[in-house]
Image: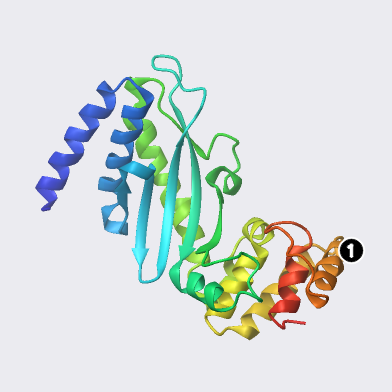
Amino acid sequence: MSEIEDGQWIDRLSAQLVDAERPAEVLRVAGAWLAARMAAEGFAWLRSRGTLQRVEGDRMEQIHLQNSRSNRAGEQVMFNVVLNVRDRRLAAWRGAHPDSALREGSDDWVCGHPLGSLVDSMFGGHLGLTHPVQRLERMEAFVGRLRQVAMPWFDSTADPSRLVTDVPDLTLGFDTSDLLEWLISRDEQGQARALLERWMALYPSNPADFEAGCELARRDGERPPPGCGEAPGWTAVRLGLL
């Protein structure tokens, strides 16, 4: 589209957004509006999934708009926002290394959590569109929040040479094993060891869980669930990082 056509499309979506009543319709239009505003960043709207997605090679970056169960037309229209990173090359590595991967099968998960976990305000990670007259203003503010918070977060997880220093502590705590595996899938053993050292410095009070995970891996015991306290130890042993 030309800039004029883009502007006309956004204007039409803006009018539809103000007029929409049902939460599902608000979600549909809001997603299309966001995709139009963030087209320069490479995002497209996947209506069936309620997701903004950007694909670069094997990597998928996703912004999910999740309909709240308490939404009611004319009463409340609010969407939870969750960020995800997925990677097909990591999925292929997992499929080829079933004894080393924590997630079974060809899972493409790298990392993810609610946008609200990265902002100061409890409601900073939500998109509230209850009142039609406030929707466009709130949408513009939300675009700013995505550019200020979500885009740097995606960048922090995109480059193996920067991951160790740039990824937020919160993300490292949520998805330690997945991030270690992602680095190994890129043949970045040194970076994986450095990331593990950073994690251990962040969580020095969890040696028992870490050792329990190591022991599970050494005796070929049952895999711990991703995200649990034993997972980093299990992964560290299976990836040869100790």
Q: Position of residue 198 (x, y in %)?
A: 72, 71
Q: Quick check: 104 above or below 28?
A: below
Q: Position of residue 165 (x, y in %)?
A: 61, 71
The kind of residue on which mark 1 rests is Ala
Q: Quadrant of residue 225?
A: bottom right
How many numbered dots are placed on residues in this image?
1
Q: Quadrant of the C terminus?
A: bottom right
Mark yes or no: residue 164 visible. no
> What residue appears at the point 43 percent right and 49 percent down from the top-left corner?
63
> What residue appears at the point 12 percent right and 53 percent down from the top-left corner?
1
Mark yes or no: residue 26 visible. yes
Q: Quick check: 167 above or below 125?
A: below
> What residue appears at the point 49 percent right and 55 percent down from the top-left corner?
84
> What residue appears at the point 66 percent right and 76 percent down from the top-left corner?
99
Q: Quadrant of residue 214?
A: bottom right
Quick check: 140 left or right of 203?
left
Name the residue beneath numbered marker 1: 208
